[in-house]
Amino acid sequence: MTMQNPVTVEMSPMRSQDEFSDWYLDIVEKAGLADKRYPIKGMNVWTGYGWKAMRLIDTFFREEFDGTGHDEVCFPLLIPQNEFQKEADHIKGFGAEVYWVTHAGENKLDIPLLLRPTSETAMYPIFSLWIRSHADLPLKTYQIVNVFRYETKQTRAFIRMREIHFFEAHTCHRDFEDAEKQIKEDLDIMARLAKRLCLPYVLCKRPEWDKFAGAFYTIGIDSMMPTGRTLQMGSIHQYRENFSKPYGITYENESGEHVHVHQTTYGMSERILGALISIHNDEKGIILPPDIAPIQIVIIPIISKTEPEKVTAACEELTVTLKTAGYRVHYDNRDLRPGNKFFDWELKGVPLRIELGARDLQNGIVTLARRDTGERIQLAKGRLLEGIKEAVSGIQTSLYSKASDTLRSSIQPATVLTETKPGINVMHWCGNEECGHRIEEATDMAVLGEPVGVGPTDGKCIVCGKETGKTIYAAKTY
Ligand code: ZN
């Protein structure tokens, strides 16, 4: 579900940029999601815990794209300079961010190679060989790989990295209309993914000056961070024939003519994980949606002097039962006080905790604690699986709706450039690029673009006062 209509709900209090930034750096480290001590700036180590969460997110990507007829492929990391340089806008957009390989052993390479910043220029020379006739279309592919971008801004785990865990779908179609259908399918995929990831978003058609290098148009997928800034989690691009012409990707149509294909791409990255951490948390730590939590349930024995062996045995049995039922379960039998264990797992965002002690065993119950609300639920042993299922779906729904409310309340109308608010400002814009740049200069915000799926409303351009039906979203961004 996308949030498109401005409503007048009071916006929840926002965190200052500095406070949030410090908190974020600290929590990524304490929750054990990434290790930033690797000796190259902007290149972190994925730890076991962080990588498991990312792999679960990747699983949803695979399910969605396999399920809609895409084939997973894997192209080489290195791209020859001459292939990279075929599409002029693309080079302009990425040129300054490229890492080059100039030597192999002791030999200087005749043609330098670059580390993919994205894979158009790796894939498209090969697509031109794969596609021969209309029967080869549509060609729908995706890959999950790492890409490299020499970021000059301050790097931040998951959000702004130089080595990025990246998802990219690339498709080829017989004409513009078929490519447009693909974009509709992409938007449906995003809506389903967002539900599982508990990440509501807005869709904006980016202004001309901010579209992807080489694209005909770009739709940005933005989420709302607790600072009132938006974070782009992904983007969908219509290329039309902008790449198929320089790369010679043609097919023979039914009348025997050779025609250029129309192309689309869909990109998402580890930023999804950055957004999740930023949006779902409290003073105790992060709160992971059950669908992506590496550990969904942690079991903590409450050991007392009476019959500790019985409690241990019951916890082990419970672990097996829940694993068999399909949950990712961890039995924490460390020699620590339960309170210390609670603290650790709350910090790491485990959505459900089960406490089990001698008295619970006598009474035939277990105690379930929800990470998001702190609610403690006593369940009779016979109702255990049912109760857990309810709690899991309850957390999933409540995280999503809470984040949706925050996003919705952050979308507010603005009619005067000097009176913008934190969050997303909805403004009328005449469509003139100069007025667009003026908005950005005067507000220190980015024009996210025209919200997708929102009809025209009458108003006056916030800059020049001209009558217009066009509105745009503007916000500070990451
Ligand atoms: Zn104007």
Image: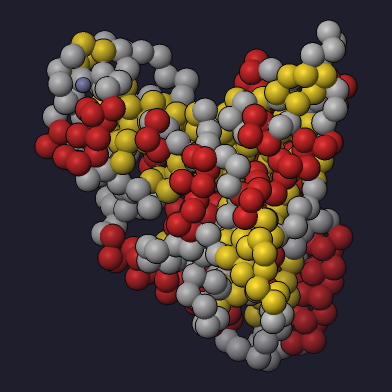
Q: Which one is in front, 449 or 97?
A: 97
Residue drawn at x 33%, y 27% is 472
Q: Position of residue 139 (x, y in %)?
A: 79, 31
Specify the quadrant that holds the N terminus.
Answer: top right
Residue drawn at x 65%, y 91% is 335
- Does residue 404 appear in this view? no
- Image: 340 above or below 111: below
Q: Which one is in front, 309 or 257?
A: 257
Residue farthest along the top direction in this orientation: 255
- Does residue 207 appear in this view? yes
Residue drawn at x 75%, y 57% is 76
Q: Is residue 251 left or right of residue 120?
A: right
Residue farthest along the front direction in this orientation: 110
| The quarter of the displayed image where residue 334 is located | bottom right
Q: Is residue 262 left or right of residue 258?
A: left
Q: Position of residue 463 (x, y in %)?
A: 16, 26
Residue drawn at x 77%, y 75% is 315
Total numbered circles: 0
Q: Position of residue 68 (x, y in %)?
A: 77, 32
Q: Is residue 426 left or right of residue 92?
A: left
Location of ligand 1 given as a quarter of the image: top left
Q: Position of residue 236 (x, y in %)?
A: 57, 35
Q: Is residue 321 left or right of residue 403?
A: right
> What colour scheme does the image use?
secondary structure
| The quarter of the displayed image where residue 113 is located | bottom right
- Image: 89 above or below 299: above
Q: Which one is in front, 344 or 360?
A: 344
